Image (tube, grey):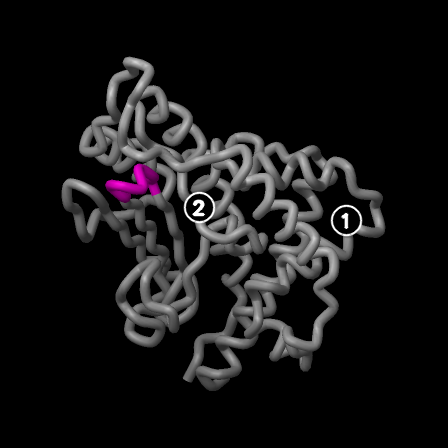
Amino acid sequence: MNWSEFVNRRSVLLYDWAVQDLRREITESFPLLRTVPIPIAQLFTEYVSNLPEDRLEKLTLQMVGATHHTALLAMNRIYAQEDRTEYDLWLEFEGQEFSERYKFPSGVITDGSQKLNKRKLLTRLVKELTPIVGGTVIHSTASEFSMSTLLPDLPSGMSMGLWVRHISGHETVEYAQSLSIPNRDGPNYGQNPNQFTSNLFRLYGLGLMEYPALKESDADPIVASLRVVCDHYVKNIPDLLRELPAPD
């Protein structure tokens, strides 16, 4: 299998899994998404709860397809030619409701709450997520860290990366997770556009995972959510790719 074929197979496997897993989330009333204290997750669960079944299925396929262009091409489909009516309606709802209801923290606390200690939160996340991911910290600063886990039973030295950073000014914690072959995909977890990088939101078509992180009271929900999210990723994505033949 050449590299292009490998990338296509990997992309289609992930697309199929994302469709099935988003269907599961909807059917089971969002057991995972309801643990994520991010406005877009809350808006999405609210929005789809009012949709009839036929529209739900169309939205699922259109939303997942929006971030899986390589998979669509491998299946002889072109995203620009796909029906995206339901996805556009969701984006319209999201844009309007988000601007009216939510505002990312400005960095100024007005209610007397304790400001988040970002270094303490990141240290805690390393401690909490290492047993789940099973990795080694390969980069760490006061505002971000990344971990890498070699998965020898996956094709050609594939490794799992985890990347978390606190964005000052925006006052959010951003998370990304990846499965890649570093010497082929690229070494920068979560940042190289040519690398196979994802998180559950991207797999579902919901975009970035940015947790509001201004107050110390934000820390516990962030830690609890990332434990659930990373565990779901680790328990599903590596097994999905285990049978892939190694690329030439």
The residue that appears at 32% across and 44% down in the rendered structure is 134
> Which numbered dot is residue 225?
none
Q: Is residue 132 left or right of residue 120?
A: right
Q: Quadrant of residue 78?
A: bottom right
Q: Residues within 10 Å of mark 2 (few under 14, many from 20)?
A: many
Which sits earlier in the primary sequence, circle 1 or circle 2? Answer: 1
Position in image of residue 133 (x %, y %): 36, 44
Q: Which residue occupies the extreme top position in the image?
A: 112
Residue type highlighted by circle 2: Met
In the image, which disc is placed on residue 209? 2
Q: Residue at x 40, y 37 (%)?
A: 104
User: Going 15% across and 45% down the picture, which residue do you hit?
Assistant: 141
Q: Is residue 171 magenta?
A: yes
Vertical position of residue 167 compared to residue 247: above or below: above
Q: Which mark is residue 56?
A: 1
Three-letter amino acid code at disc 1?
A: Leu
> Dot 1, crowdedness within 10 Å: few (<14), some or many (≥20)?
some
Q: Classify mark 2: helix, strand or loop.
A: strand
Residues rendered magenta in the picture: 167-173
